[in-house]
Image: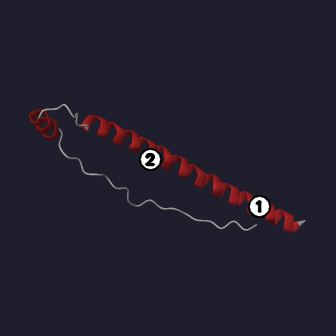
Amino acid sequence: MHQLANEKERLQEELVRVCDRQQQIVNRLAELDRNLAQLDLDVENSAVNAEMTEAQFVHKIKAKPIERIQTTRGATYESMIIEY
C-alpha cells in the first residue's frame, strides 16, 4: 500500500513537470509563429518586383534601414527521463 502511494505521488510530480514543459513548448511555438509571421511580412515588404526600374529598386533598398536579427539568450530547457 505504501509503495503504491509513493508511486502515485511520483507520477503526480512527473505529470506536473510534463505539463510545465508542455506549456514552455507551447509558448515557444507561439513565439516562433509570431517571428515567422514577422519574417513573412518583412519579406513581403522587401520584395523586389521584376518590373521595377533600377531607381525604384535603389529607392526601396535605401528606404528601409537594415535591421539586425535579434537572438534569444538565456533560455533554459529541462530534460527528463521517463522510465517504463
- Residue located at (62% from left, 65% from top): 80
Does residue 3 appear left or right of residue 41 in this picture? right
Instruction: Give the amino acid type for the residue marked by disc 2 in the picture.
Output: Leu
Callout 1 secondary element: helix
Which quarter shows the C terminus? bottom right
Which quarter shows the N terminus? bottom right
User: In the image, residue 29 lies at what x, y percent?
Assistant: 50, 47
Q: Which residue is mark 1?
A: 9
Residue 18, relative to residue 42: is it above or below? Answer: below
Q: CA distance from mark 2 to mark 1?
A: 35 Å
Instruction: Give the amino acid type for the residue marked by disc 1 in the picture.
Output: Glu
- Residue sitting at the far top: 51
User: In the image, residue 26 lies at what x, y percent?
Assistant: 54, 47
Q: Which residue is mark 2?
A: 32
- Residue located at (70% from left, 59% from top): 13
Does residue 63 appear left or right of residue 4 in this picture? left
Task: Report the front residue among 19 and 71.
Answer: 71
Task: Report the front residue among 42 and 1.
Answer: 42
Residue 64, relative to residue 14: is it above or below? Answer: above
Crowd class of label 2 (few under 14; some 14 to 19; many from 20; radius 10 Å) = few
Crowd class of label 1 (few under 14; some 14 to 19; many from 20; radius 10 Å) = few
User: In the image, residue 64 lies at what x, y percent?
Assistant: 18, 39
- Residue located at (34% from left, 42% from top): 39
Label 2 vs 1, first from the N-terminus:
1
Callout 2 secondary element: helix
**Residue 55, located in which quarter of the rendered image?**
top left
User: In the image, residue 44 lies at what x, y percent?
Assistant: 30, 35
